[in-house]
Amino acid sequence: MEHEAFPKVERDPVFGEGGAVRRPVDLFDPAFKANPYPTYAYLRDNAPVYRAELPDGQGMWLITRYDDVQALLKDDRFVKDLRNAKTPEELERLPKQPELLEQLAQNMLDLDEPHHTRLRGLVHQAFTPRLIEQMREKVRRIAEELLDAMEGKGEADLITEYAYPLPITVIAEMLGILAEDRHLFRGWSDVIVGSSGILEPDESQLAATFALADYFKALFAERRNRPKDDLLTALIRAEEAGDQLSEGEVLAMAFLLLIAGHETTVNLLGNGTLALLQHPEQREKLARDPGLIPGAVEELLRYTSPVEMATQRYAGETVEFGGSVIPRGELVMAVLASANRDPRRFAEPDILDVERKNNRHLAFGSGVHFCLGAPLARLEGQIGLTACCVVCRTCV
């Protein structure tokens, strides 16, 4: 029987007879946000390279088929740094950003070669599968402590008391952030990632960004005086080594590692738990055979797509792509959630199957920007879902 991990929403279809567009896709429509999959199915079949419009009038191309998304993520005609897609005159006409935001944009996620590879290389060793596997017992301990605290309450908030604190505690320990300060990051990071990342930040997001930056700068000063065996100290030492990292790059890297280092896993644990509760027969399979857990995490990554869209790219030149012409400088989004439900790639893609084979999902992206933290997210997902949904059954 087919189940959906998202509620069905009654709405007028975007496309009419013969695939004609009846009305524009509204990415901020609550009905679309509640369940985007029917719209993505229409787009895959009728307009796989579709130009939507943002509230500010800016065009945004949605790429929805699996093969197209994979091709886009590997196509160097699409750039991450807007400066590589606009002329100096066009850049001059763009609204000026606060200096701090300009600094934070100099992170490996938003840069092209060769800068991306240089920055990624400085932190890659901390996220290799071998080193992450050595953290398994630590992650298991954190998960068990969180579940122990929830047990006996009668009622608990899965996100607040488990899905969020598990990955934030892990990445905070890696960075070397004091335990008593970690509660600060919940408020700041929630506000910072509160929008889709497409529109300009509002005042609350700017305030949270400045507060987090001030905290990190103070922590950098402390680490310079009293180095520790943590990731922040390693970044600062790279800065002090000369032409490795500038002070602004250290700050941008710390922001990226903290926010990207937990946000995806929160979504995986929350949506993954919901999906397993809505598919009790799949959950029972995992209870009977915990050896299925690694494959089940891959299936939940595909089925729930913790990151709905990859971070933005821009056409570095006028590009013919998927039968459409995308003008230079326009925003292009690879819709991972749609690619992961494409029936051209996956049999019965709307069905959750923890024993699915050949599951080459795109939840972590593809190409040179493939998610650096994928080994850590997989480890946290395996341990977090095992403890919560298979062994503990707190969520029954």
Image (tube, grey):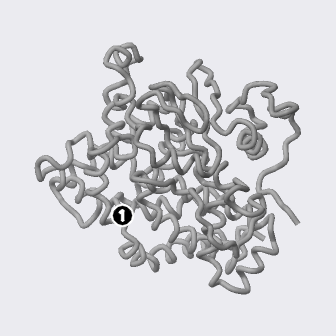
Residue 292: give x, y in percent of width and height: 65, 80
Q: Tell me if residue 9 comes above or below residue 22 in the rendering.
A: below
Residue 91 seen by the camera:
yes
Residue 206 shown left or right of residue 46 in the figure: left
CA neighbours of label 1 inside 10 A, class few (<14), some (14 to 19), many (20+): some
Dot 1: element: helix
Say whether residue 227 is left or right of residue 140: left
Q: Which residue is mark 1?
A: 174
What is the quadrant of residue 276 in the picture? bottom right
Under mark 1, the amino acid is: Met
Left or right? Give the position of 25 relative to 218: right
Asked which quadrant contains residue 133, the reply is bottom left
Residue 38 location in percent, x, y?
79, 44
The outermost residue toward the left is: 242
Residue found at x 62% / y 74%: 295
The foreground one among 62 and 363 is 62
Q: In which quadrant of the rendered image does the C terminus lie? A: bottom right
